[in-house]
Image (cartoon, helix red, strand yellow):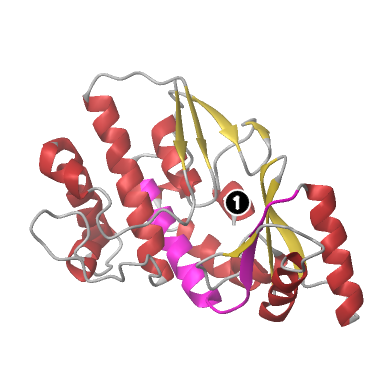
Amino acid sequence: LCLVFSGQGPQHIFMGRQLAEAFPTFLEAVKEQDRILTQVYKQESMLERTGLFIPGVECKLAANGQWPVQEVVLGLVFVQMAMTDLVRSLGIKYDFVVGHSIGEIAMGYASGHYDREMAVGIAVARAAAMTRAEGNGAMVALGVGVQKAKTMIRKVFSQYKVTEGLWIAGINSPQAVTVAGTHELIDAMVELANDPNAKVFAAKLRVGCAFHTPLMEPQEELFKSKVLETPLAHGTNAPVARVMSTTDGKWLDRELDVNYCWDNI
């Protein structure tokens, strides 16, 4: 059995609410994560600020999932970690874990490399870095493979007479990639994909940053400094499940340390 943790996209105002109503273990987990957030990392309560998860409390976030990046990061990490606790409480054994983007935080928790305090701290650091990067670019999902995406990128570069500003940020399947870059060039990619002669699926993502590109590099110092304020500074724990790394594209063969966390971003 393999547990898979997603990145941005599936966030929703009702996520986890039925689980919180039906399973005390799930609700206790999100509350404990919120306690760590407030008492250990001196942050405002995510549960009180957003209204997520708690039965009978109205969510204060947008129904379309276009939330401030801080709420996306903490919301997804909280729900994924709580679901891991629920799976364990039900006696379900898993052998492998894999995560994409933000999902690699919960992946580290599920694999045993991170304890709860580490994982919440990494989420806090990531939220801070991503919040400061907000507005630095955009992303688009394309229904093409890597080589076709590279050809499209070269066409846009030629059109705008530039040599950088677009990058393949994620390879989701043999015929699905994500491209990230500046707002202007991402819009040009969408326009190129929508050309009747191209017939390429293209959907701009509901994000305000060009994640997984060099445009994130200005946030490295902030991110690493905050991660090193967490217990991860003293090393990870012994794993309980094998990890397939989407950052490295292979079975994990290194520590899930601060450098790995940054490479993920």
Q: Where is residue 194 in the image (x, y as percent from the top left)?
A: 71, 68
Quick check: can you spot residue 37?
A: yes
Q: Residue at x 56, y 79 (%)?
A: 135
The residue beneath circle 1 is: 264
Q: Residue at x 64, y 52 (%)?
A: 263
- Is 35 rendered above or below residue 184? above
Q: In which quarter of the image is the C terminus?
A: bottom right
- Is 72 rendered above or below residue 134? above
Q: Position of residue 210 (x, y in %)?
A: 62, 68
Q: Is residue 40 magenta?
A: no
Q: Where is residue 42 in the image (x, y as percent from the top left)?
A: 27, 67
Q: Does the magenta stretch include residue 132?
A: yes
In the image: residue 60, left or right of residue 138: left
Front-most of residues 257 and 127: 127
The part of the image, by quadrant, that contains residue 178 is bottom right
Residues shaded magenta: 118-144
The part of the image, by quadrant, that contains residue 139 is bottom right
